[in-house]
């Protein structure tokens, strides 16, 4: 096999794995009342905006988020850490 074929196969495997993870995490259930809304860090503001919406609608009294300091967002995207950006969006 050529290097290009191997790289194409590897990309295909990674893509399939990523789709499985996305489909698992892409919850389609209706939200229910909870103690806290958890958000995973990343370069998209969609999760934090959704968390803010759920908070305002009374689904939970708290929002918590997990970040590794911006590997997938943060300073490279916004010029500030994910935590700082999320705080800015929420306030």
Image (cartoon, helix red, strand yellow):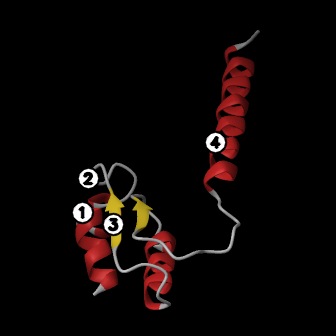
Residue 66: percent from the left, percent from the top?
Answer: 34, 56
**Disc 3 to disc 2: CB gap under 8 Å:** no
Residues at marks 3 and 2, CA–CA distance in whole angstroms:
15 Å
Q: Is mark 4 on a helix, strand or loop?
A: helix
Q: Do the residues labelled 2 and 1 touch (CB within 8 Å)?
A: yes
Residue that mark 3 sits on: 64
Front label number (3 vs 1)? 3
Look at discs 3 and 2 and give the one toward the viewer: 3
Please report whichever mark, 4 or 1, sits nearer to the chain's N-terminal start. 4
Classify residue 43 by image quadrant. Answer: bottom left
> Which image quadrant: the N terminus?
top right
Q: Which residue lies furthest to the top in this view?
A: 1
Q: Is mark 3 on a helix, strand or loop?
A: strand
Q: Which mark is residue 69?
A: 2
Mark 1 element type: loop
Residue at (26% x, 61% y) in the render: 75
Rounded to the nearest whole Å, what is the CA distance between mark 3 and mark 4? 24 Å
Identity of the residue drawn at 33% across and 66% down: 64
Q: Name the residue under label 1.
A: 81
Pointer 2 or 1: first along the chain = 2
Callout 4 touching callout 1 (CB < 8 Å): no
Select label 3 or label 4 by which is in front. 3
Classed neighbour count for the residue bearing mark 2: other residues with Cα under 10 Å, few (<14), some (14–19), many (≥20): some
- C-alpha gap between disc 4 and disc 2: 21 Å
Foreground residue among 76 and 34: 34
C-alpha distance separating marks 2 and 1: 6 Å
Q: Which mark is residue 41?
A: none
């Amino acid at each position: 096999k050529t290097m290009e074929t191997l790289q194409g196969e590897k990309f295909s495997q990674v893509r399939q794995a990523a789709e499985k993870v996305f489909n698992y995490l892409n919850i389609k259930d209706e939200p229910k009342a909870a103690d806290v809304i958890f958000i995973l860090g990343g370069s998209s503001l969609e999760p934090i905006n959704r968390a803010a919406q759920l908070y305002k609608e009374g689904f939970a009294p708290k929002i918590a988020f997990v970040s590794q300091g911006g590997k997938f967002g943060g300073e490279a995207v916004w010029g500030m850490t994910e935590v700082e950006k999320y705080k800015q969006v929420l306030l």
